[in-house]
């Protein structure tokens, strides 16, 4: 991917309704996970253009890592966050370093998600916490997943099994209110893609909505989920999943 893509993505992370509300949900939960921890060290994996790393800096000392070389160079040149290039499958950090290890919409991009969770646990301190977000439900699979090189979408049961049920702090679906319209949109996209003359997949979901008014409306709808999730109420279904856990006992 070229620099122009990441310039566009930089603005998406800071202006698109989904990114804005998702980031607030994530930061609220990270704040809860770090309660009582003095001067926490935080690792954010797969940071893209660094929006969530910037937000996490209000909570502690943040290290960031990005796999894509072009994206890494783009984000590093912004000079706002501390970032290294590397993979979640082989994190370039010592064991037992971080109080909070984050991977927001990352593990669906790697074939060996169990190894990714192992590495997150390895660099976490004994009393540390892990937090991940992932796309939910295989039935929502669309060209968006193909364009973004996803290997899978998860159910809550699958994610809990991956992390380890005994280690779970909190696990819930989110972006639930918009589930039905998004589900229908993805099915329509899939049908159109089948008959697309060029045979190429359609654009990412982030390219579908360009109206600022629609963006504002969707943001307000999505924001209705912030308070329930902040109170750690679980939602029964949704477009995404958020899950936090304790470090595995044997690591």
Image: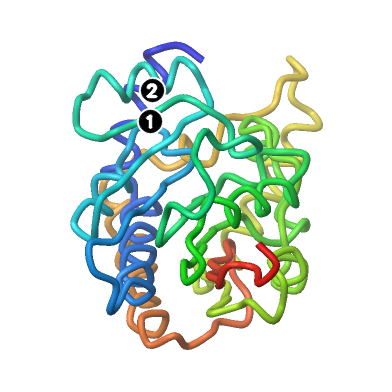
- Observer-nearest residue: 238 or 245? 245
In terms of secondary structure, where does tag 2 sit? helix
Q: Please state the horizontal and vertical placement of residue 238, each as a whole percent of the image.
A: 59, 69
Q: Is residue 2 left or right of residue 196?
A: left
Q: Is residue 99 left or right of residue 173?
A: left
Residue 180, by quadrant, is bottom right
Query: Which image quadrant: the C terminus?
Result: bottom right
Residue at mark 1: 9
- Residue at 49 percent across and 51 percent down: it is 104
Q: Please state the horizontal and vertical placement of residue 125, each as a whole percent of the image.
A: 48, 61
Residues tagged 1 and 2 counted as in contact (Cβ below 8 A): yes
Mark 2, Cα crowd under 10 Å, few <14 / some 14-19 / many 20+, is some
Mark 1, Cα crowd under 10 Å, few <14 / some 14-19 / many 20+, is some
Q: Please state the horizontal and vertical placement of residue 189, each as a whole percent of the image.
A: 67, 41
- Residue at 33 percent across and 46 percent down: it is 16
Residue 146, by quadrant, is top right
Q: Which mark is residue 49?
A: none
Q: Is residue 239 left or right of residue 224?
A: right
Q: Is residue 46 visible?
A: yes
Depicted 55 relative to depicted 5: above or below? below
- Observer-nearest residue: 27 or 13? 27
Residue at mark 2: 6
């Amino acid at each position: 991917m070229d620099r122009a893509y990441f310039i566009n993505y930089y603005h998406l992370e800071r202006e698109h309704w989904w990114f804005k509300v998702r980031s607030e949900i994530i930061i609220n939960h990270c704040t809860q996970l770090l309660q009582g921890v003095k001067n926490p060290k935080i690792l954010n994996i797969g940071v893209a253009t660094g929006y969530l790393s910037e937000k996490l800096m209000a909570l502690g000392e943040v290290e960031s890592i990005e796999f894509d070389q072009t994206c890494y160079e783009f984000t590093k040149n912004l000079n706002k966050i501390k970032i290294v290039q590397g993979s979640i499958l082989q994190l370039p950090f010592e064991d037992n370093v971080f109080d909070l290890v984050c991977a927001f919409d990352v593990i669906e991009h790697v074939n060996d998600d169990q190894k990714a969770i192992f590495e997150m646990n390895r660099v976490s301190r004994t009393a540390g916490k892990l937090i991940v977000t992932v796309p939910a439900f295989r039935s929502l699979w669309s060209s968006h997943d193909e364009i973004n090189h996803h290997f899978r979408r998860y159910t809550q049961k699958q994610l809990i099994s991956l992390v380890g049920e005994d280690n779970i702090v909190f696990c819930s679906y989110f972006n639930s209110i918009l589930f039905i319209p998004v589900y229908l949109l993805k099915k329509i996209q899939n049908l159109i893609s089948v008959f697309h003359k060029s045979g190429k997949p359609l654009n990412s979901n982030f390219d579908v909505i360009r109206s600022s008014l629609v963006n504002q409306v969707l943001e307000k709808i999505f924001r209705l989920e912030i308070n329930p999730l902040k109170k750690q109420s679980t939602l029964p279904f949704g477009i995404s999943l958020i899950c936090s856990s304790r470090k595995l006992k044997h690591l």
